[in-house]
Image: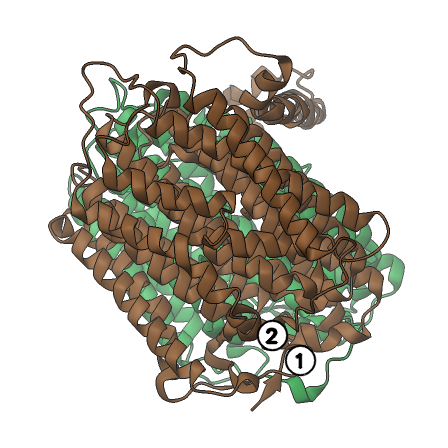
Chain colours: A brown, B green
Amino acid sequence: MLHTYAASGLVASPASGVFSLTWLLIALPLAGAGVLLLGGRRTDGFGHLLGNATSWAAFLVGLALFAGLLGRGAGSRAVGQHLFSWVPVGGLQVSAGLLLDPLSMCFVLLITFVGSLIHLYSVGYMAHDPDRRRFFAYLNLFVAAMLLLVLSDSYLTLYVGWEGVGLASYLLIGFWNRNPEYAAAAKKAFVVNRVGDFGLSVAIMIMFATFGRVDFVGVFAGTSHASSAVLTAIGLMLLLGATGKSAQFPLQSWLGDAMAGPTPVSALIHAATMVTAGVYLVVRSSPIFDAAPTARLLVVAVGAVTLLFGAVIGLAKDDLKKALAASTMSQIGYMMLGAGLGPVGYSFAIFHLLTHGFFKAGLFLGAGSVMHGMNDQTNLRGFGGLSKVMKITWLTFGAGFLAIIGFPGASGFWSKDKIIEAAFVGSGWQPWVFGLAAMLGAGLTAYYMTRLFAMTFHGQARWSDDVHPHESPLVMTIPMMVLALGSLFLGAVLGPTGAITGWLEPVVGAASEGGTVLAPTVISLATLALVVIGAGLAWLAYGMRPVPTAVPAATWATVAARRDLYQDAFNEAAFMRPGQYLTRSLVYVDNRGVDGVVNGLAALVGGTSGRVRRWQTGFVRSYALSMLTGAAVVVAALLLVRL
Amino acid sequence: MSEFPWLSILGAIPLVGAVVVMALPRGRDLLAKQVALGVSLLTLAWTVAIAVRFDPSAGGFQFAQQLSWIPQFGVSYAVGVDGIALVLIALTAVLTPVCVLAAWHDADAGKRSVKAYFALLLVLETMTIGVFAATDVFLFYVFFEAMLVPMYFIIGSFGGAQRSYAAVKFLLYSLLGGLLMLVAVIGLYVASGGGPQAFLLERLLGTSIDPTTQKWLFLGFFFAFAVKAPMFPVHTWLPDAASQAPPSGAVLLVGVLDKVGTFGMIRLCLPLFPDASRWATPVIIVLAVVGVIYGALVAIGQRDIMRLIAYTSVSHFGLIVLGIFAMTTQGQAGATLYMLNHGFTTAALFLVAGMMVRRRGSRMIADFGGVQRVAPMIAGTFLVAGLAGLALPGLSSFVSEFLVLVGTFTRYPAAAVIATLSIVLAAVYILLTYQRMCTGPATEETKGFADLTRREAWVVAPLIAIIVVLGFYPKPVLDVINPAVTATLKHVGATDPTPVVHVAEGTQK
């Protein structure tokens, strides 16, 4: 049966032909994870090979499906595959079903391609780790869960993938959990994400109570009849879910700590794919957000706040990975902002998500390569001058650097510029506030990325004598080169050609041009000017002048940024300490109070003068047994009377 | 009725097995264990045979058998199963052999007779099957009380250092509940007019009892079930009993015995006293929600791993009761499924924790560390069990927890939203525990931990397999539960709230 699920009238047809293979996308990496986890040490020898094979195979299936979709008309590029009935209870009928449409296709290609490149890279990066097999099992598990997340045809199955990627993230952040701090970081990520999951759960409950359905088709078909209060509530709860998974304000605090995971994990999960799931959720739910302007406004606000929040933290971080993490938070802020703008921004949010997937993964793999050559150091103040000894890393990282700052022509330029432009669309105060925030963010990005790039690769060498930096092996540098090509050219291929907007239009509607409060050329030029100023200032401060190896004293603003704008201090004071106090007092009350009252009452009834200690004496035990006997006698007596 | 007595034989198998085990000569402990395992596996096989013959679409009680027992007092021996009872009997039948295998060395060190321990486990199985299968209220009561005896001895004779205190506390609480229930049982006889088949469930369902009497009778039954479940605020016996019992005993106590409480609510409270049930619902919903959050918060503060698991159960039982009294199809089907899933999850948690406790000689969480390094299989299974405990989607408890919450939401949105907060707390108590016990560097004491033995692997493998399979494909179980839930709700006169927006059929999947 055909059914429409988007405002534009896109219909999903049942899977046939090549599309009947859609389930394999998930099954292949899942099988890989299963074999490697259940097989245990017996699979140590070939774990990395199997992990790569399943991931690359999923990519090939993805390509075949992409070709299949391309071969269809724009209005019929959607395929639904029903797998089995999952939760059938009364009015709630949820099936395990997949939906392949232009939006999920983008993600499938991103996840399987960038994911496979990172699988390949990990062969080299994790070569000397005794648990490499387990690492690949978790990576495969992640890919399977992420594909389930983007291919699900209902919110409930999406939720399975949603928490599945959370589990993989937990396992991989804590991969080296021998270090107690890493174990704590993994737990923190999961718990903070659960706060977001609370939102997603409640959103699904409201959907069921309102529409009697939790699948996309059913929910979207009902939106036009639902009250705006209900839609706003759903939108806000979905946004809460999105802020958790995508490390957006106010649930951003876990991402920096998540850098405890091995660097390929940071590249794949905490930069290119998983953390963008929140953006996917918002864009996928476009029919709901289109009808809930208040919720959408809040999405934009969250995006704007986070993009500045992350950028400010990035300005001051001396840890290579944590600076990149702050940057990820900021870049996803851009995507969130774009997604919140509605039809003018949806496709650009996804566009930026795709280009970011390439350049940020490339930057992280570059960072991993630097660490590989520098005894796993991440302190920027201990680097410098690496451009001479790690030429490939320098060049590929440079490509990512150009992309993220929005260097004209590079991938990030096309995608970020479009979001900034879209932020200026509208009337009233909003386009000015959000547009200027997005523009300012571009300048800050240029500053912190130039600072990071200069401190790592340029200036005088500041590493100690026992470090011998060297270029990484080909198995690592090839994925870096591929991602560098994407960082440079993907934007130009998809953006100015109109390919990405045209491709996504059947799902998210047309991205109409115009309506900005400033002329687009003015916006572009002003943004470019800010980028030049930001990059120039950073180059003057860190590229031209010597960088002190010790952390210099700084103003309160810099200190605040170094300490992540006190996010952890706030959470600790507002939630953790009161929480610990609460649980401790409840335990006390439970032991002394609730139990004490009941013990006391029982003792009183038993005439033992309220001394609980007597419970342990034989006296009370015989009392209990006499009670049992008493009950038996009562029953017997009652029976006898009748007899 | 002349049908083949499938259920009576099912109940008799473990009882006969217990007698055989006790009749074995002294000193043949291994043989006693093997016989006990064999008998419990035979019971499982018999249960499978029943489950295969069960017709989910037929409705009503199947494999029914009815004999006049004490006609003067209206008592019959009547058994039969609907989907809910079948599911819980299956839970018992799966967990008993698992517990027998897990308990292999539990009684070795003590002075008490080893064969008696295994015989007690089997007797307990008979009593539990009896209580789930009873379709006569008096017979239900008899099994309900008789169940206490083997459990009392399992805790009191084979438990930890504080076993006497825990066993007596368990007994007193249960007896108090039981006595009130006895009064209510007698009251029911009077109120329903007596007769030779006075206690037969089928007959009682048709009788209408005046509202005031209904309320008193409801309270009598409900209190007994609330203690058994255990619900906040009558839960405090559970942490003591569960932490002092040997791990297998704790599993049967929390995993199976406590289900009798929530089962009783569905089987007796709702259909027999529909008006009173609706009358009491607001208070029960509040207590359930408080229990969900309270249990989770107190669990976070525990230092003893066994007590911690017990408190997580207090939280989960709150959810089960919430689902039952939401009076929606999703809520009650979810609650029933939760009873099943909670049984497997808690069993896995208690048993794997028990394996670690046995190796370390301490139940204190702080005494562990770095287990993942030295015994990855133990840590891995503990993590999977824990993830099932925090209802990770893809594992079995997620489906039931979600059904309970969504089913509650359609009628009591505020209660559902507050209860949903427990998913955050669950993540804290499970992952914090895992972090403390299994991550970090191995300590001096945990360094020598051996990984899962072959016997231990056979204990956890079936549990993990069920947890995963029911997470992905709960449909067969739901198909069995659904008709019974629909029947119960019909007795209470509750219909599901209809969605606000009608989504056109043209968009049906």
Label 2 sits on a secondary structure element that is: helix
The residue carrying mark 1 is A8
The residue carrying mark 2 is A505
Residue B463 seen by the camera? no
Circles 2 and 1: CB atoms closer than 8 Å: yes
Q: Is residue B200 left or right of residue A488?
A: right
Name above or below for residue A499 compared with residue B103.
below
Q: Quadrant of the N terminus of chain A?
A: bottom right
- Residue B282 lies, in percent from the top left, at 81, 52
**Image point (42%, 60%), residue name:** A490
- Residue A378 lies, in percent from the top left, at 35, 26
**Image point (28%, 39%), residue name:** A393
Q: Amino acid at mark 2?
A: Glu
Question: Circle 2 marks a residue in which chain?
Answer: A
Q: Residues within 10 Å of mark 2 (few under 14, many from 20)?
A: many
Question: Circle 1 marks a residue in which chain?
Answer: A
Q: Quadrant of the C terminus of chain A?
A: bottom right
- Residue B96 lies, in percent from the top left, at 36, 54
Name above or below for residue A540 compared with residue B58.
above
Seen from the viewer's position, the closer of residues B395 and A533 is A533
Distance from label 2 to label 1 (Cα)?
8 Å
Seen from the viewer's position, the closer of residues A441 and A279 is A441
Seen from the viewer's position, the closer of residues A347 and B33 is A347
- Residue A372 lies, in percent from the top left, at 24, 33
Which of discs 2 and 1 lies nearer the camera? The answer is 2
Q: Decide which of tag 2 and tag 1 comes sooner along the chain.
A: 1
Q: Is residue A528 left or right of residue B186?
A: left
Residue A115 falls in image quadrant: bottom left
